[in-house]
């Protein structure tokens, strides 16, 4: 008995027809729609710092990028709730919750950057020249190579 693989289907077809994917896709579309509605009521500066996480049973959970924006939005919470209640999608809104979750930093960007002066690099290089252990000498030479370019 030979195995016959299923014929490939376009991603758009899978999203519309496969039940688990369809549910996820519909949920993502619903959140995107709620996000657009929220952004229409937020101040322009706050829009990039506030995202809809969930909307269920009259409770709207918003993810905010830092404590500063969470505090600002909490001060405006009553006004925002009144404005959102005017929209059909949020007609049953009873409370808004804010959760601070810092934006993720791209991999490698958050690492420690070494800032080594030319004088420090010369001192490390001079120390390396007096070392007899080849591994330690190589490590010191690599460290000295991290000096800032002159200029």
Image (cartoon, grey):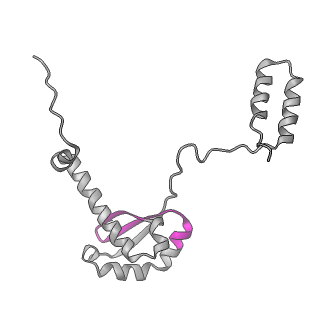
Residue 133 in the figure: left or right of residue 90: right
Question: Residue visible at 28% across and 68% down?
Answer: 57
Quarter assignment of residue 136 = top right
Asked whether 59 falls inside the magenta stretch, the response is: yes
Quarter of the image that includes the N terminus: top left
Residue 114 on image: x %, y % = 72, 43
Residue 26 in the figure: left or right of residue 3: right
Question: Residue visible at 26% across and 57% down?
Answer: 27
Residue 39 on image: x %, y % = 39, 71
Residue 53 on image: x %, y % = 37, 61
Residue 69 in the figure: left or right of residue 85: right
Residue 65 in the figure: left or right of residue 37: right
Question: Residue visible at 35% across and 66% down?
Answer: 35
Relative to 31, does residue 17 appear above or below in the rendering? above
Relative to 104, does residue 84 appear above or below in the rendering? below
The magenta span reads: 51-71
Question: Residue visible at 26% across and 73% down?
Answer: 89
Relative to 26, does residue 3 appear above or below in the rendering? above
**Looking at this view, is 95 or 138 the one in front?**
138
Quarter assignment of residue 31 = bottom left
């Amino acid at each position: 008995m030979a195995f016959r693989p299923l014929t490939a289907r376009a991603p758009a077809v899978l999203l519309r027809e496969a039940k688990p994917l369809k549910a996820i896709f519909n949920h993502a579309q619903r959140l995107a729609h709620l996000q657009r509605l929220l952004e229409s009521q937020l101040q322009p500066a706050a829009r990039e710092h506030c995202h809809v996480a969930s909307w269920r049973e009259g409770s709207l959970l918003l993810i905010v990028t830092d404590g500063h924006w969470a505090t600002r939005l909490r001060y405006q919470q009553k006004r925002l709730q009144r404005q959102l209640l005017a929209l059909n999608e949020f007609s049953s809104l009873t409370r808004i919750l804010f959760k601070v979750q810092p934006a993720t930093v791209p991999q490698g960007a958050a690492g420690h950057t070494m800032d080594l002066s030319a004088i420090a690099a010369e001192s490390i290089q001079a120390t390396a020249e007096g070392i007899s252990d080849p591994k330690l000498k190589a490590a010191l030479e690599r460290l000295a190579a991290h000096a800032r370019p002159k200029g």
